[in-house]
Image (cartoon, helix red, strand yellow):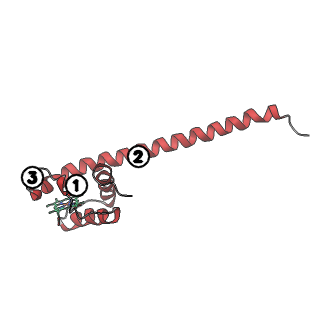
Amino acid sequence: MNKPQSMTMPLTLQKLALVALAALALAASRSHAQDAAFHRGQTLHAEKCAACHAEKSGLGNGDVLYTRSDRRVTDTKRLEGMVARCNSELRLDLFPEDESDLVKYLLGRFYSFK
Ligand code: HEC
């Protein structure tokens, strides 16, 4: 025998609401993790990268390296490559996770390519 609709509908809605809540919570924790990575990248950048860039640019502010019109980095792959190169050539001793946080920071702050 079939249950009447009125008994099953609210349950289904409740389940839907739970699923929606779970999805929201997941999205929130993801973006929280993204934020954390961004901020770690920002700190690492200030500690390991900014001073040399500021000096090399001759302007006291290394950020111009990322925004100059003839900048070398034109897509995410190159950005990853450049961060890895600065890391290994200069022996900055960053872990892959540090590099990935730095990339997130630089992407979010300076570069915006699709
Ligand atoms: C000892 C100096 C030095 C340090 C430390 C350094 N860099 Fe660099 N970086 C340079 C120089 C010089 C350039 C410019 C290279 C060129 O124009 O050919 C550069 C360029 C870059 C670029 C390319 C900018 C563009 O779009 O043209 C990125 C990205 C970059 N560095 C990332 C980093 C990161 C991330 C760190 C820290 C983990 C770092 N660098 C540490 C010297 C340094």
Q: Are marks 1 and 2 in contact (CB under 8 Å)?
A: no
Q: Choose the circle earlier in sequence order: 1 or 2.
A: 2
Mark 1 or 2, closer to the camera: 1
For label 2, the SS is helix
Residue bearing the label numbered 2: 33
Q: Is residue 14 left or right of residue 109?
A: right
Q: CA distance from mark 1 to mark 3?
A: 13 Å
Residue bearing the label numbered 1: 67
Quadrant in the picture for the C terminus: bottom left
Q: Which of the two residues, 71 or 56, is positioned nearer the viewer here?
A: 71
Figure check: 73 above or below 15: below
Q: Are marks 1 and 3 in contact (CB under 8 Å)?
A: no
For label 3, the SS is loop
Q: Which of the two residues, 63 or 91, is positioned nearer the viewer here?
A: 63
Q: Is residue 77 left or right of residue 5?
A: left
For label 1, the SS is helix
Q: Amino acid at mark 3?
A: Leu
Q: CA distance from mark 1 to mark 2?
A: 26 Å
**Residue at point 45% right, 46% down?**
30
Residue bearing the label numbered 3: 59
Q: How many residues crowd around disc 2 within 10 Å: few (fewer than 14), some, or many (20 or more)?
A: few
Quadrant in the picture for the N terminus: top right
Q: Quadrant of residue 67?
A: bottom left
Figure check: 18 above or below 30: above
